[in-house]
Image: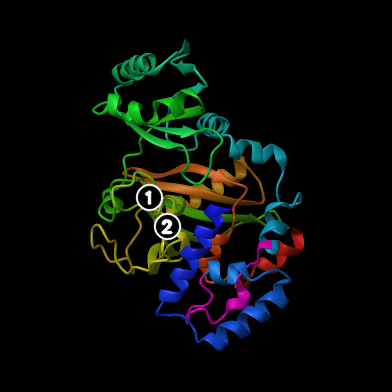
């Protein structure tokens, strides 16, 4: 309860300080219309910044009921595909088997049982864990690995473990690793044009795909996430931000967006590097689109949110999500209900 009150206070503070908000009477009028139209409390009206002057088409944004209708639909989602997407170990092994580019699986652990090069080790404590990773770096030739919780989402449970700072990294994350289930993947060598914007995290593009009634795959939208302030993950849940992508041109467009609980800041350039976003070209973008459509052919769930990194040699799939909240893409797209395919999606749901 205390956490929720603090969150509400934070959001109220963001709205009160926002210089771009509509007039009070207009906000009240739109809140009432949104409430009646969506048949729910107008939580998303504020959470999606629809009170801002630029949100003229506030009715085109999805309500929580519409989001649930899509994400919980048994017609759009199937358990056997969802299980491949949600389990990072299964996803990594399946994609590698089918020659779909993903970060290479170096090792993994299920609790204190660790698997590396077809050998199983039982790790009892941080000291044993140090020996395990020291051996891993020596025999794999890697100097760092990304450790990701097999079942977590939104950047939770993602840790960078490096050879150079191994004792320090395990001092911070070692207990979590020993008490959980994690995959250990090679770190993507990010394309220099993406590093130019922000190099401390692997900055990913989120593509939403939809398989229509005729079994044709469509890319609904794309946006790109960036880390900031030294963070090694790009997720909005970790304080990062995101920008819309012009799918036809493969460039960033407009200003950035940020979750309200982190301040809802909007930026025209990256705060750490000063790189201007508008029109910034994304390397290998069209190759990324082709890769996404190929991936859908192997996991044909009808709506998936795909995260793609751009390496120095081409696109790499980081993960796929069947339980996409649609909050972020809805904001990035500027109201998903204006998309020409969304009426069909809701009908199919």
The numbered mark at residue 45 is: none
What label sits on residue 203 in the rendered view? 1
Please tell me whether mark 1 sits on a helix, a strand or a loop.
loop
The spot of residue 8 in percent (x, y) is 53, 63
Residue 88, compared with residue 273, is above or below; it is: above
Q: Quadrant of residue 36?
A: bottom right
Q: Residues within 10 Å of mark 2 (few under 14, many from 20)?
A: many
Provide residue 105's location: percent of width, then percent of height: 44, 28
Q: At 66% from the left edge and 47% from the top edge, which residue is drawn?
A: 301
Nearer the observer, 155 or 41: 41
Residue 53 among magenta residues: yes
93 left or right of 279 in image: right
Report the magenta stretch's main SS.
Answer: loop
Query: Does residue 246 appear anywhere in the picture?
Result: no
Looking at the rendered structure, the secondary structure element under dot 2 is strand
Q: Which residue corresponds to the image point at 27% horizontal and 50% vertical from the top-left?
A: 195
The magenta region covers 49-64
Q: Are marks 1 and 2 in contact (CB under 8 Å)?
A: yes
What residue would you read off at disc 2? 224
């Amino acid at each position: 309860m205390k956490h929720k009150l603090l969150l509400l206070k934070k959001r109220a503070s963001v709205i009160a300080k926002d210089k771009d908000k509509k007039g009070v009477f207009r906000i009240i009028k739109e809140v009432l219309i949104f409430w009646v139209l969506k048949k729910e409390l107008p939580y998303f009206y504020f959470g999606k910044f629809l009170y801002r002057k630029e949100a003229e088409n506030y009715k085109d944004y999805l309500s929580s009921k519409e989001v649930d209708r899509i994400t919980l639909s048994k017609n759009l989602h199937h358990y056997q595909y969802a299980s491949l997407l949600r389990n990072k170990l299964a996803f990594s092994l399946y994609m590698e088997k089918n020659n779909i580019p993903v970060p290479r699986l170096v090792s993994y652990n299920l609790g204190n049982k660790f698997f590396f090069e077809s050998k199983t080790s039982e790790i009892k404590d941080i000291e044993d864990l140090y020996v395990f990773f020291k051996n891993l770096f020596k025999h794999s030739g890697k100097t760092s690995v990304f450790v990701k919780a097999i079942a977590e989402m939104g950047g939770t449970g993602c840790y960078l473990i490096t050879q150079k700072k191994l004792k320090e990294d395990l001092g911070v994350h070692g207990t979590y690793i020993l008490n959980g289930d994690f995959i250990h993947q090679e770190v993507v060598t990010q394309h220099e044009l993406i590093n130019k914007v922000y190099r401390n995290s692997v900055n990913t593009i989120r593509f939403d795909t939809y398989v229509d009634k005729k079994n044709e795959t469509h890319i609904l939208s794309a946006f790109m996430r960036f880390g900031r302030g030294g963070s090694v993950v790009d997720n909005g849940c970790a304080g990062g931000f995101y920008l819309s992508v012009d799918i036809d041109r493969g460039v960033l467009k407009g200003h950035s967006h940020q979750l309200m609980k982190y301040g809802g800041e909007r930026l025209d350039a990256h705060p750490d590097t000063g790189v201007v976003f508008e029109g910034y070209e994304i390397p290998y973008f069209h190759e990324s689109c082709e890769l996404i459509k190929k991936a859908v052919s192997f996991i044909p769930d009808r709506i998936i949110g795909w995260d793609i990194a751009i390496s120095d040699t081409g696109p790499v799939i980081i993960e796929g999500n069947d339980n996409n909240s649609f909050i972020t893409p809805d904001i990035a797209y500027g109201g998903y209900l204006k998309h020409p395919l969304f009426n069909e999606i809701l009908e199919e749901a």
